[in-house]
């Protein structure tokens, strides 16, 4: 009984202590990432956050003299987490969209991404057939491409049905399972998928390229200015090009 | 096949760390539920009218709203509104604890009602007060009777803890997804996660069964011998 009480006591104390350390740590910023978004953000073999945005933020934090923690968050809840101050910044391949700008602010664009359609490697379907035929296609829930596909289907006379996924790797998995014919996703994660699985990039399906930026709360202008200045500095260094190469962003 | 096995082998330490998070959440939630649930059960049986109404509302609310919704409501809503900066793990533990408390209250209430009321009279004949009778006569029996139902509740909460990642607590399922996104070995990894859950459930249920046998009072049991 005593032992059980002790275990319970230790558990409670460590939970409370855990709560306090996050509350009172000094100059620390928490970066919320979608860890299912390689190569921009993912968890590496050793269980640590890695990826293009993770390393870029490490550089920026060091430059600004901040301590940084990368916290994996479900993509669905990531903006809510930012607004409720669970995290301070989202550096995780987030597109700057008018909808998002109503709620949060973005840094300068640091990367332009194309949105492409991925299909099975041995498929010989054309883009027109895919979009006009009665096919099921996939997209990650809460992304601009998911919204776009839904909004554009009727005006453009497309007849697909959309399946929503938690992450683009899961959509790729379902292409291979044959449950969907194609999946819309950003080009960099698509290159990653092509290098690891039996899929290919069919091409662009009409969506304009999008700019990625790091997101902060609207009232957090100080952080925004600092990160902007530092990001600009970083983009001028050779380290930036090294990162682009390392994470195969251009293919 | 070999590739899958290598991925699982590499990912195992990372996933097992996730099991620890799961264990912390579940153990914390179950004991929070035990404390709250026991108090509420006593309130339901012995309490005044207003106590019964309050407890009834609590149980009705937590049984009626899905855990997923509760997690969002509490983590992004209530805790934030109250100015509490809880970690995701602490928040999940509290929310699951409050949810299981509603179910545990009913488990304990049923157990209390199954104790013959004659014992209460016998206790007062011996000069015991009401509180004493509850603490020393009723509750020790109630806790023993409740172990099987409590063990069911444990396995349910263990599996509900897989929802924790919606607010960012890195438990087994979240970590499984992370590794799958990097390696594209979804199926083998989800099988591994299933096995980890199975081991946790099995050892918990087994442990509670052993506890049940250990605390059994020889020659006295409601289940016959």
Image (cartoon, rainbow, N blue to C red):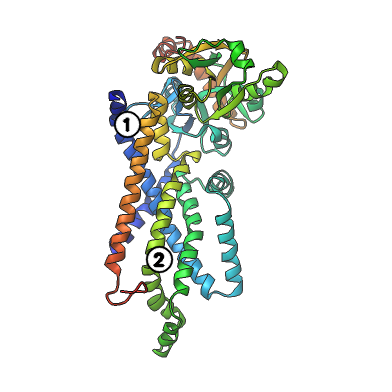
Q: What chain is tagged by disc 2?
A: B
- Alpha carbons under labels 2 and 1: distance apart: 38 Å
Quarter of the image with the C terminus of chain B is bottom left
Which x, y percent locates residue A213?
55, 21
Nearest to the observer: residue A9 or residue B196: B196
Judge whether residue B126 can be spotted in this image.
yes
- Marks 2/1 same chain: yes
Is residue A92 positioned above or below A76 on the image?
above
At which x and y percent is residue A132? 64, 16
Q: Earlier in the sequence, mark 2 or mark 1?
A: 1
Looking at the picture, tell me which residue is in the foreground, A91 or B203: B203
Q: Quadrant of the N terminus of chain B?
A: top left
Classify mark 2: helix, strand or loop: helix
**Residue positioned 43% across, 47% down in the render:** B159
Q: Chain of mark 1?
A: B
Q: Nearer the viewer, mark 2 or mark 1?
A: 2
Drawn side of residue B1 relative to residue A204, left or right: left
**Disc marking residue B212:** none
Residue sitting nearer the eye, B200 or B87: B200
- The single residue placed furthest to the right in the displayed view is A155
Image coords of residue A37 (percent x, y): 47, 24
- The residue sitting at 50% across, 51% down in the picture is B95
Count of numbered circles in the view: 2
Residue marked by disc 1: B11
The label on residue B146 is 2
Rendered view: B84 above or below A42: below
């Amino acid at each position: 009984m005593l032992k059980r009480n002790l275990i319970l006591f230790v558990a409670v104390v460590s939970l409370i202590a855990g709560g306090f350390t996050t509350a009172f740590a000094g100059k620390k910023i928490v970066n919320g990432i979608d860890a299912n978004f390689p190569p921009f953000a993912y968890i590496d073999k050793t269980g640590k956050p890695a990826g293009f945005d993770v390393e870029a933020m490490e550089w920026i934090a060091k430059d600004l003299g901040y301590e940084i923690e990368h916290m994996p968050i479900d993509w669905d809840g990531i903006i809510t987490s930012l607004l409720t101050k669970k995290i301070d910044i989202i550096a995780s391949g987030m597109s700057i969209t008018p909808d998002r700008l109503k709620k949060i602010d973005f840094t300068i664009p640091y990367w332009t991404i194309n949105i492409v359609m991925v299909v099975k490697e041995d498929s010989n379907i054309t883009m027109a057939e895919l979009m006009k035929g009665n096919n099921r296609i996939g997209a990650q829930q809460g992304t601009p491409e998911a919204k776009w596909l839904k909004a554009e289907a009727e005006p453009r006379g497309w007849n697909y049905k959309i399946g929503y996924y938690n992450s683009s790797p899961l959509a790729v998995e379902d292409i291979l399972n044959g449950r969907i014919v194609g999946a819309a996703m950003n080009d960099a994660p698509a290159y990653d998928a092509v290098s690891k699985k039996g899929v290919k990039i069919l091409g662009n399906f009409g969506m304009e390229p999008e700019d990625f930026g790091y997101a902060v709360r609207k009232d957090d202008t100080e952080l925004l200015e600092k990160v902007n200045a530092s990001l600009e500095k970083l983009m001028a260094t050779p380290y930036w090009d090294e990162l682009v190469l390392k994470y195969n962003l251009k293919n | 096949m070999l590739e899958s096995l290598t991925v699982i082998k590499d990912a195992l330490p990372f996933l097992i760390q996730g099991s620890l998070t799961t264990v912390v959440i579940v153990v914390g939630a179950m004991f929070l539920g035990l404390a709250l649930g026991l108090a509420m059960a006593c309130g339901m049986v012995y309490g005044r009218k207003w106590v019964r109404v309050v407890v009834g509302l609590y149980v009705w609310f937590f049984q009626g709203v899905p855990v997923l919704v509760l997690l969002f409501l509490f983590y992004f809503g209530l805790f934030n509104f109250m100015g509490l900066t809880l970690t995701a793990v602490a928040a999940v533990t509290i929310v699951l604890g409050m949810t299981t408390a509603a179910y545990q209250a009913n488990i304990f209430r049923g157990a209390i009602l199954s104790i013959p009321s004659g014992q209460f009279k016998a206790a007062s004949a011996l000069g015991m007060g009401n509180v004493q009778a509850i603490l020393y006569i009723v509750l020790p029996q109630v806790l023993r009777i409740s172990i099987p139902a409590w063990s069911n509740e444990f396995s349910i909460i263990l599996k509900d803890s897989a929802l924790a990642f919606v607010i960012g607590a890195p438990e087994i399922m979240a970590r499984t997804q992370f590794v799958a996104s990097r390696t594209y070995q979804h199926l083998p990894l989800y099988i591994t996660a299933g096995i980890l859950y199975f081991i946790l459930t099995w050892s918990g249920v087994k442990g509670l069964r052993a506890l049940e046998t250990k605390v059994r009072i020889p020659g006295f049991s409601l289940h016959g011998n």
